Amino acid sequence: MFLDLSQLVVHYQGRSHAAVNGVSMGLPAGEIGVLIGPSGCGKTTLLRAVAGLERAKSGSILLERETVSSSTTHIPAEQRRVGMVFQDYALFPHLDVGHNVGFGLMHLDHAQRTQRVAEVLDLVGLSNVRKRYPHELSGGQQQRVALARALAPRPRLLLLDEPFSNLDVDLRERLAHEVRAILKQAGATALFVTHDQFEAFAIGDRIGVMHEGRLHQWDDAYELYHRPATRFVADFIGHGVFTRARIVQEGDNMMVHTALGDLRDIRECPLPDAYTEGLCDVLLRADDIVHDDAAPVKAQILRKTFRGSEFLYTLQLQSGETVMAHVPSHHDHAIGEWIGIRAEVDHVVTFPPG
């Protein structure tokens, strides 16, 4: 692995609990990793530890097989050849774009520096703004200048700490795709921190979900959504609820009894003896629930959110349990109305009752 963390623990002085607690993960060269999780979960602290801005209490960080952090080793940030893009971009207001990008290239002669600045500005699509100052640029352009400046010295690893958080929603999504394309074209290895799942899915090859200092899962977006490793990941990623269920074996067939009926043809379900008497909670995503007026199961609409092409309905079953469903927006039902629903679940994800 290009970046390899093993049982990393980071403590802040004066605090009893670890900000990063036993995190292990690996990032191959040329891939983009993303850390997400609620505020205070430890994702930015982990990023700062990789940068060399925080010390490891135990465990290790290896960069290209070189130990840069451990309980006995701490290579300073300036010696790690790690680039960083900050939340506020940290551009120098008194320097034009060309001098901002070339700031970390003072070891090169003038001709080499000029050539490298031109290369990275072309990479981020800003060749025409070299003589402008940061205040003359849009937020998206400033973000790309910050990215160009970080890439200019050819860092072996690029770290990005919520670089889109100051931008509006539409621009964030577009820039996430643009930045991914830029990083891939540059062949960069990058670790990115965000609290926005859509950003994470747009930019990341691998995504880590953190909570209370621990890394719950490090996987691609599809696996996180369809095969969450922990109840927290299942609850944090996407829209879904947990409903009571029981796994039963009938001959060669296995099924899951739920309030929405039996889930059959199960491909990845645990055996009934995985839980006491087969009792468990099953995760039902909003896209697992299909609106079907002919279905025998009825549910009452408690809430609905319009999302253009679809509604997100929150529904209550006659049993009192709640589920969510994505429904095409031409099915515009009133709050309080009862509609038919059925479950179509390809990936059955179960957890102990909770």
Image (cartoon, grey):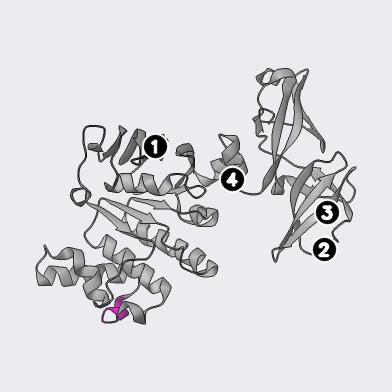
Label 1 or label 4, whichever comes before in sequence order = 1
Q: CA distance from mark 2 to mark 3?
A: 11 Å
- Which amino acid, by three-letter code, is at mark 2? Asp
**Residue 150 in the image: x percent, y percent?**
28, 61
Label 2 or label 4, whichever comes before in sequence order = 4
**Residue 183 in the image: x percent, y percent?**
36, 58
**Relative depth, front residue between 144 and 250:** 144
Q: Is residue 177 above or below residue 344?
A: below
Residue 236 badge: 4
Residue beneath disc 1: 25
Res. 230 image quadrant: top right
Q: Mark 2 and 1 residues: CB-CB less than 8 Å, in contact?
A: no
Q: Which marked residue is nearer to the observer: mark 2 or mark 4?
A: 4
**Residue 7 in the image: x percent, y percent?**
37, 31
Label 2 or label 1, whichever comes before in sequence order = 1
Can residue 239 be spotted in the picture?
Answer: yes
Question: Quadrant where the N terminus lies?
Answer: top left
Q: Which marked residue is nearer to the observer: mark 1 or mark 4?
A: 4
Q: Mark 3 and 4 residues: CB-CB less than 8 Å, in contact?
A: no
Residue beneath disc 3: 301
Residue 332 badge: 2
